[in-house]
Image (cartoon, rainbow, N blue to C red):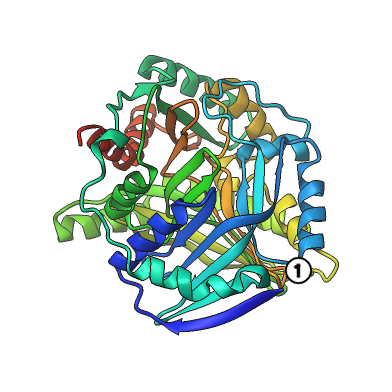
Amino acid sequence: MRSQHKKKVILDDTLKQKLLVWGASHEHCIWLDSNDFEQNHSNFKAVLAVDAFTSIRTDDFDAFSKLEEYQSTTKDWLFGYLTYDLKNDLERLSSNNHDGLHFPELYFFQPKKVLLFSHNEVEFHYLNMVSDEIEEDWVTITEMVLHTESNETTSSPVKIHLRTSKDSYFSKLSAMLEHIEKGNIYEANFCQEFFAEGVQLDPVETFRHLNELSKPPFATFLKMEHWYAMSASPERYIKKTGREVISQPIKGTAKRLQDPDQDKKMAEHLVANEKERSENIMITDLVRNDLSRMAVKASVIVEELCKVYSFEQVHHLISTIRCELRPEVSVVDVLKNTFPMGSMTGAPKISAMKIIESLEDSKRGLYSGAVGYFSPSNDCDFNVIIRSILYNEQNKYVSFSVGGAITANSIPEQEYEECLIKAKAMREVLEKDSSQ
């Protein structure tokens, strides 16, 4: 059982930084920040969960069944992640590419302490065993003295390497286009990894820099033991509220421009671009198909199709698909029926995943997986882990991956340029951190 307590509070940048520093002092911590983005369907401005009371950590074998048992038995707040490679639990697939990060495939924890932030209030949901710590924790957080500069000893030079060379990228893209030409797939999300070894990062500062550059609606700081994710994700994977489920895939990208008129034209060009729209529409159809497996008949609706949303670095086309669940469908079933998300796989999904595995050089792991939570009322909300820096503190390996949708109309040079645009913020953050 949990004790609940409310306080009036203004969630400004200073308080956010204090919450993040305090949260990261625990072995398990997840911070979710909407950055006040004007986004429909959001319940909270920000959420902080810390200090595991119980947890589940597993490889891909029977992972969703184990998660179902854990979630249905616990019936409480659970926070954690699903890696892309849980696809192997759902289909006859494998993941044999290079893995420098070694994240467990699935990791969730039941936090002792949850803080939910709305417009002018914070709700504390503390397990009864620690409910007497609410006031003490709040004093610790609010009276914290922040250092304006991170300790120089916590950062080391970061030399970014490409797992896939530029020549190899074009060769692999050519092979993928052949698959499309033969009709094996219509679309696939092809990704490449940027990495560095022997790195000592300050994860809190790294996340802060990344979030300042991107200000996304699904920003995430995750710490699970020595595994970290610092995410500037703009994309929601899936959300369940009662019997309603929504999914909001992103497909279609254009860079932001400094001149307002030119930037507006760029957004208009994105909406009118047949290739970008076709990418989005194909994935929207895939998501509709995934949702229809568990939806009340005729309840799957496309609420928004190819709507432009503008972020700090890029414009994106986002579609919103909604359905009503059949009564017997559990919250974990919602994930099983839709994972991995169509925006990070392709169509048809299974064929695309097989081809992705054969052509990519790195195991995706948490990249193109999801981070989020289950609520005590069996609801959930998960993002898509893109625009994210992943870090294994134990083996000092840091990585970020980027990719894009490949269709018959793809121009390899433009696809490569899109990857570099998406990589810009992560690269800038790591190289900036290394120079402190």
Query: Which residue is outermost to the right?
Result: 328
Quarter location, residue 163:
top left
Q: Looking at the image, which is closer to me, 195 or 53?
A: 53
Quick check: 348 above or below 25? above
Query: Which residue is outermost to the left?
Result: 259
Q: Quadrant of the N terminus?
A: bottom right
Quarter location, residue 192:
top left
Quick check: 158 above or below 71? above
Q: Amino acid at mark 1?
A: Leu
Residue designated by label 1? 325
Local secondary structure at mark 1: loop
In percent of the image, x 45 and y 77: which residue is there? 118
In percent of the image, x 76 and y 51: which residue is there? 67
Left or right position of 124 against 313: right
In percent of the image, x 16 and y 53: which residue is there? 258
| Residue 158 screen position, x and y as percent | 30, 27
| Residue 56 screen position, x and y as percent | 71, 47
